[in-house]
Image (cartoon, grey):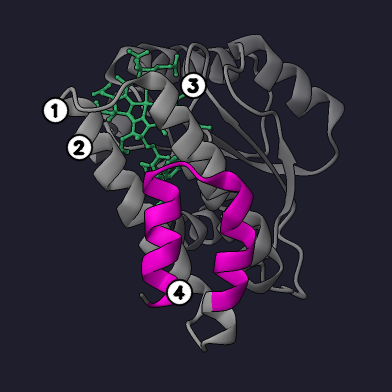
């Protein structure tokens, strides 16, 4: 079995203790960091399908996510670029009621590599916490909000509304996450939408330029 197949299997079965070694093995075999990341994302897709089909349950999703996070740790130094320009600070978080952070972390890494300083508020972030963080942080040019559940789409809406109603200015608001559409983003008053991590970095730059 190739190392990349081993990595995929370890994500799908949630074997977090062995994954760092397998990811390093794939790198040693010459597989690019970005390709390993894509393979792990595809495996999370398999995990999601199994969950939808009732073949696995929340604990299995959780250990798969933990396994992927350990694998990403190995890749992180290779994926984060060293942008020499500074585009200001981006505050990022997953909105209230939502605990998904793998996609948010990936988006954060990509936006950082585009030249932003990142302040990550984590998951399940109350609307007001975004406002506090904007007030506490120098040179905020972007606020990035992630939401993965159809049930937390209203949290995206209220977060955008709370941030805009604060009267604070000088930054743009970017939203994304699997259930989010460009139409929804426009409807809730976000300044931008991106479907994935790569395009989030491109959009982030575009919004602040
Ligand atoms: Co949950 N979960 N989960 N889950 N989970 C999904 C999202 C789901 C699609 C699974 C399924 O049913 N097939 C489903 C949502 C259905 C829906 O709402 N339509 C679901 C559900 C139902 C739930 C629970 C409700 C289950 C339950 O308790 N009964 C529960 C909710 C908990 C909560 O949040 N309150 C729950 C819990 C969990 C775990 C905690 C166990 C775990 C998360 C652990 C963690 O993140 N640390 C988990 C996981 C792992 C998943 C799946 C399997 C994988 C998510 C993931 O990491 N994908 C997921 C199924 C799936 O995605 N196929 C699923 C990989 C990641 C790289 O992709 O997150 O989409 P993604 O991020 C992408 C884009 O969305 C985008 O770019 C990213 C990178 O390209 N993006 C942005 C994300 N944020 C962005 C921000 C941007 C721009 C782009 O700008 C700011």
The residue under the point 63% across, 60% down is 20
Do the residues under discs 4 and 3 have CB atoms within 8 angstroms? Answer: no
Q: Earlier in the sequence, mark 4 or mark 3?
A: 4
The question of residue 6 being in magenta is answered with: yes
Q: Which residue lies furthest to the left in this view?
A: 53
Q: How far apart are marks 3 and 2 (CA)?
A: 31 Å
**Distance Cα–Cα, label 4 vs label 1:** 28 Å
Residue at far bottom of view: 30
Compared to residue 44, the image places residue 190 above or below, namely: above
- Over which residues does the magenta segment extend? 2-25
Judging from the image, what secondary structure is the residue with disc 3 in? Answer: helix
**Circle 4 sits on which residue?**
3
Q: In this view, does 139 lie to the left or right of 153?
A: right
Residue marked by disc 2: 49
- Asked whether the residues under the numbered discs 1 and 3 touch, taking CB atoms below 8 Å apart as contact, a structural biologist would say no
| Secondary structure state at the residue bearing disc 4 | helix
Real-space Cα distance between discs 4 and 3?
43 Å
Q: Does the residue labelled 1 lie within 8 Å of ligand 1?
A: no
x 63%, y 39%: residue: 171
Label 2 residue near ligand 1, CB within 8 Å = yes
Q: Confirm or deny contact between disc 2 and disc 1 (CB under 8 A).
A: yes
Instruction: Quickly name the residue at label 3.
Output: 160
Say which mark, if any, is on residue 42. Answer: none
Q: Are marks 3 and 2 in contact (CB under 8 Å)?
A: no
């Amino acid at each position: 079995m190739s190392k990349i197949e081993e990595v995929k299997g370890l994500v799908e079965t949630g074997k977090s203790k062995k994954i760092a070694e397998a990811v390093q093995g794939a790198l040693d075999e010459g597989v690019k960091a970005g390709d390993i990341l894509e393979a792990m994302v595809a495996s999370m897709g398999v995990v999601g399908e199994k969950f939808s089909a009732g073949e696995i349950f929340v604990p299995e999703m959780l250990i798969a996510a933990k396994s992927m996070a350990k694998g990403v740790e190995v890749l992180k130094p290779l994926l984060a670029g060293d942008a020499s320009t500074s585009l200001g600070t981006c505050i990022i978080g997953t909105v209230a009621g939502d605990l998904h952070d793998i996609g948010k972390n990936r988006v954060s890494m990509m936006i950082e590599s585009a030249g932003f300083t990142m302040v990550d508020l984590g998951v399940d972030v109350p609307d007001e916490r975004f406002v506090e963080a904007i007030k506490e942080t120098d040179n905020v040019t972007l606020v990035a909000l992630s939401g993965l559940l159809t049930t937390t789409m209203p949290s995206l809406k209220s977060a955008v509304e709370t941030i805009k109603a604060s009267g604070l200015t000088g930054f743009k608001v970017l939203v994304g996450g699997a259930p989010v559409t460009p139409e929804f983003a426009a409807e809730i008053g976000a300044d931008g939408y991106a479907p994935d991590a790569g395009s989030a970095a491109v959009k982030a730059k575009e919004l602040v330029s």
